[in-house]
Image (cartoon, rainbow, N blue to C red):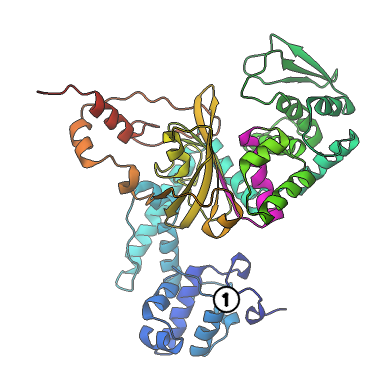
Amino acid sequence: MISADELASETLDEEVGVDALTLGRRIRARRVARDLTLEQLASAVDRAPSQVSMIENGKREPRLSMLRSIALALGTTVDDLLRTDAAPDPRDALEIAVERAQRGPVFEALGIPRIRVSKGQTDETLQAILSLHNEISRLHRERAATPEEARRANVELRATMRARDNYFSELETLATELLTAVGHNGGPVSQQVVADMASHLGYSLHYVGDLPHSTRSVTDKRNGRIYLPTEQSASRDSRSPILQAFATHLCGHDEPRNYADFLRQRVETNYLTAAILLPERDAVKVLTEAKNLRRISMEDLRDAFAVSYETAAHRFTNLATARLGIPVHFMKVHESGTIIKAYENDSVRFPSDALGAVEGTTVCRNWTARTVFDVEDRFSPWYQYTDTSTGTFWCTSRIEKAKEGEYSVSVGVPFDHVKWFRGRETPHRAVSHCPDESCCRRAPTGLADRWADQSWPAARTPTSLLAALPTGTFPGVDQTEVYEFLERHAPRTI
């Protein structure tokens, strides 16, 4: 079995099997056992005491080269420090549990400031904090059993998508087999090719004027018929309802047993639809050529396959990491600031509630997904760099319209990967301190003083099965926008 010292990677990752908090406590325990001060250990490994302190507190993961130096100074081995068993002692285990709780979504959602866990606190104090945290978590889970089932299910689904880099090889295979069966040889997939696919699968298409208003299509499985509306939405691809109708057949979907099952089926249906409209072989070829030329563009991908911008952006997230080696995040945000869809595998920090749910929360006003709404030029892509607590991210975003209002669709990557994209030269830059309320969630003091007790806005939020009720005094309302509006229209005294 290969030892930790022989690992080729220079940084720790999840495969090592030990988290930073446990590793830090184990290093501290070994240091104390050898009667070494923090300064002495720092000197032995040629680092500043503050750096070693951050490692011991679990705030920084050491590179393996640094870990080797620490192990040598402590008279132990990397394998010993990276053991996956329990913390060094019960007190360390308690401290780790409290630290982990403070870094979780409950503390963040409630705005509770962190405390510095130290030896000065008694076990009883730390246990009380941990017990309160666990009880709040339990109450949130209990409250989420019915209305918030969608949010909890979506959290689990997003974790699955992240673990697979949003790439589903089995669905790629289904799409390739179907395209081959109807003789598609490359390029955009036409309406006729889609009709040929339906016929190949034993379905006939019927366009009617009385389709139920809550449906996009209705499939008669007994008679092999797919019913579609005679009037097509100007903002919707006419091929998508057909593909989504028989994608359910291809994926072998049965009636959903629960909401989680429904969400999974919807993701699979949408994935397969995009995989057919932007075939993997052709899309990877286009994207690889663009990467080599350092000009990847969602607009170019959209135009190459005659799909919507949102479909192109979604499809890019399927292929970006698995086929191009680029970590990525995606957001669809309503003009109110409410997140409708989101995906990430690049360490960007989305806002979330105490359950860890992202959909239904409000995105920072300084992120590209929000600033794009203030751009007058709606014909050109909007590019922006945003400095956040987890690093600098570059995003490209566009506005799309729907019956519920306007939405921004954004694709972003960490700064190290922006070199592959068109628009990297943009001068637009913003800074986000969210989830710190002083960033954008709290209205400026002057405005709040004048209007806090004199306003009563009625929220207009998008309807979405995935969207949890946004939090706040008036759910879904951006108070700063309300106050600015009142300020502009207030009577002027002479």
Task: Answer with left or right where residue 192 lies relative to residue 240.
Answer: right
Residue at x 67%, y 53% (from the top left corner): 291
Task: Answer with left or right where residue 213 lies relative to residue 374.
Answer: right
**Residue at which label 1 appears:** 82
Q: Is residue 421 visible?
A: yes
The x, y position of residue 341, in whole percent, is 55, 38
Above or below, comparing residue 208 to residue 97 in the picture: above
Residue at x 60%, y 65% (from the top left corner): 14
Of all residues, the one furthest to the top in this rendering is 210
Residue at x 50%, y 43% (from the top left corner): 358
Q: What's under tag 1, amino acid-wise? A: Leu
- Magenta-highlighted residues: 308-330
The x, y position of residue 494, in whole percent, is 9, 23
The x, y position of residue 259, in whole percent, is 62, 34
Residue at x 21%, y 24% (from the top left corner): 490
Q: Nearer the viewer, residue 126 or 305?
A: 305
Q: Nearer the viewer, residue 450 or 489?
A: 489
The x, y position of residue 444, in whole percent, is 25, 41
